Image (spheres, helix red, strand yellow):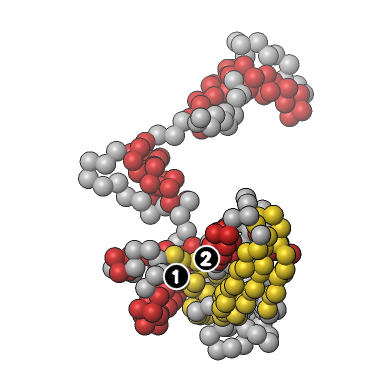
Amino acid sequence: MPLPVPNLDDLSFDELVADAKTLIPLYDPDWTNYNPSDPGITLVELFAWFSEMVLYRIDQVTDESKLQFLKLLGITLGEEEELTSGIQRGAKQFSESYRAVTVADFQLLSKQSLLEIPGILDTYPDLAVRTLCLINTDMENGTGVSKEAFGHVSVIMVLQTENQKDLLREVTEIKQSVKAYLDARKLLTTRVHVVEPDYRDVVIEMTVSAKNQSIGSIVNDSIVRFLDPVSGGEEGQGWLPGRKLYASDLYHLVEGITGIDHVTSVTLDSPDLLPFQLFKLKDLKIEVES
């Protein structure tokens, strides 16, 4: 549904004349003849007519005006391109991020730049990407752990693919490409660092009670998905950096699986995380008892 076009000024000719007449006693008390035959009233009506025409034109935006507005946005119509098409491109431009200013900008543009690397999706068609951004942090030189680094922005690239070993061989070039892309779009005084994730190992041993002995694989897959750094977590957008894993998280997750009677025991080795660290599942053992 299109937005209603506002009426910028709705004063009519009669209203303009009436307003002008109310000001006459203030500026010229001796002027008492307000008949149309009075030369002064004739001028008032003439200027009211001109004013009404100007007000009418305020609400009208010509094609030439629209072209000038598009030029201000840096948009030039192509050969035989219709004005409507140019306006649509201009409106779309407002929803696109080009400059890296906010945390969301850095996360969006870093992911976009990675996916635009020539041939990367052909080589890794199953590539899953998650980007994290930390402000006032220099993860590249290790100062993000102990103190703030004002003006520094660290982008963490979390990449997953079945061919992970080959991807790791190219990760240095990937980071350089993303950094160059962000450097061209950042604010002048910002220092950008593109780094790999800092993982901490998690070990889980769990015993569940269920009638179906084969349900262990379902439990295993559910926990692996839950701890996934790209698509895990409570909202399916990746495990939250710095969030500790508790046994209660696993109880809540597993006991919600159809076919599970209850969780008998959980042994969890889960370290505390710094705000920029993520989990990596090192070992997971599931035992099913009837």
130 over 282 or under it: above or below: above
Classify residue 260 by image quadrant: bottom right
Name the residue rendered at 40%, 66% in the picture.
127
Circle 1 SS class: strand
Residue annotated with mark 2: 230
Name the residue rendered at 34%, 63% in the picture.
125
- Where residue 227 sits: x, y (%)? 59, 67
Which residue is most to the left?
79
Circle 2 SS class: loop
What label does residue 126 carry, if any? Answer: none
Q: In the image, what residue type sits under mark 2?
A: Val
Circles 1 and 2, Cβ within 8 Å, touching? The answer is yes
What label does residue 160 carry, if any? Answer: 1
71 over 41 or under it: above or below: below
Toward the viewer: 223 or 235?
Answer: 223
User: Does the image show residue 181?
Assistant: no
